[in-house]
Image: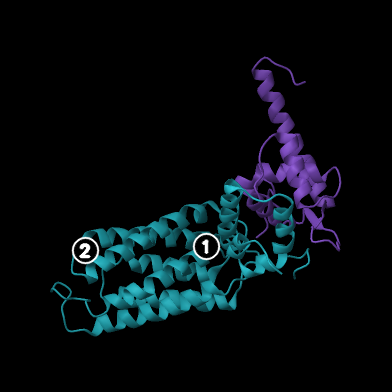
Chain colours: A cyan, B purple
Amino acid sequence: MTVDPLLRLYPARWQHRYATEMDALLADEPPGLRARLDLAVGALDAHLHPWWVPAWPVAAAAAGGVAWTFAGAVALGQPVPPDWPGYLQETLPVFLAASPLLLLATLGASTRLGPWDPVAVRAGRPIAVVGWVAWMLLLVAAVANLGAGAPLAFAATASAAGILLIGIALLGAGDWGAGGALLVAALVLVIPAPWSAAAFGVAWTVAAIAELRDPRPRPRTTGRLA
Amino acid sequence: MTPEDPVADLGGLAEASVEILVVLSGGAAHGYAIKTAVERETGRTLGPGTLYAALARLEERGLIEPLPSDDRRQPYRLTGRGSQVLAAELTRLQALANRGLERLGRTAE
């Protein structure tokens, strides 16, 4: 079956449930620019508000958490003191590679309450995204030896604030495992200790395990898709 | 987690959702029919992404349900719970409108 390419932006589960009828709608009324933009926003919304359990948040949290733990452990053992030039230079690329994964994991954690977004998630999600994106850009600057110490700490604090808000929302919904892990991740991210990077990675790894053990968004009870 | 207020909890989609429920209170309809009815009754464009974001949430909350169909078009109808929730929401909106009009020194038509 050929469907409108914009419908391909929707999650696979969504397409399975709605693509046929949405395509029929688009056949009845071919979309203009505004409707196409509306579809693109709708696709983003569908990714952020699933009624099913998506696999990518767990995968992103596990891969990012393990990579971050590894880089943190290596940084702990490296002989260069924290106040010397070159500190963390070897591990920065690993942190950089793990960052987009943990950005995805943060977004994934924010979808754990399904279609219902508490205020803390609505506030925490954009703050975390801005923090993570700024963090990654500044980390690139640090890898290139451009220096980004203070702004990097500010970006990390923004990420931590966003993660903290999402963690609080999850705890408020009784999601103790993932919520608690995110709370710990947020707190250790702002602690300037040599062990905090490894602890941040461990917290995300724990979050991945908790998400795997306790899938949240429930399958719908009505409709064609169980 | 079950929302306390199934309509208010829809956030930015609450208005479109109420309009969709109002259309379905007149009988089952598929996506295109709902879209054109909302646009005809409100004068407001309802994009396909917004329509299906609202339909998915309403179905998730058990306020509407799909009907069997051999066509690619999927008709939906209001459930008993959807009917109750819509009546409560319209009553709330009516009270709000009456209060506002009264303060403006006007009466509802």
Residue A172, position in %: x, y? 55, 60
Q: Quadrant of residue B90?
A: top right
Residue B69, position in %: x, y? 85, 61
Residue closest to the eye, A18 or A156:
A18
Q: Which quadrant, please, contains the N terminus of chain B?
A: bottom right
Q: Secondary structure at mark 1?
A: helix
Find the distance from the CA under tag 1 to the CA under tag 2. Answer: 28 Å
Q: Which quadrant, please, contains the C terminus of chain B?
A: top right
| Residue topped by disc 2 | A149
Q: Amino acid at mark 2?
A: Gly
Q: Subunit of mark 1?
A: A
Which badge, 1 or 2, comes first in the chain's sequence? Answer: 1
Compared to residue B52, the image places residue A89 above or below, namely below
Q: Secondary structure at mark 2?
A: helix
- Identify the residue shown where x is 73% and y is 56%: B61
Task: Report the side of B93 relative to A109 (left or right).
Answer: right
Q: Residues within 10 Å of mark 2 (few under 14, many from 20)?
A: few
| Residue topped by disc 1 | A110
Task: Report the side of A168 relative to A52 (left or right).
Answer: left
Q: Amino acid at mark 1?
A: Ser
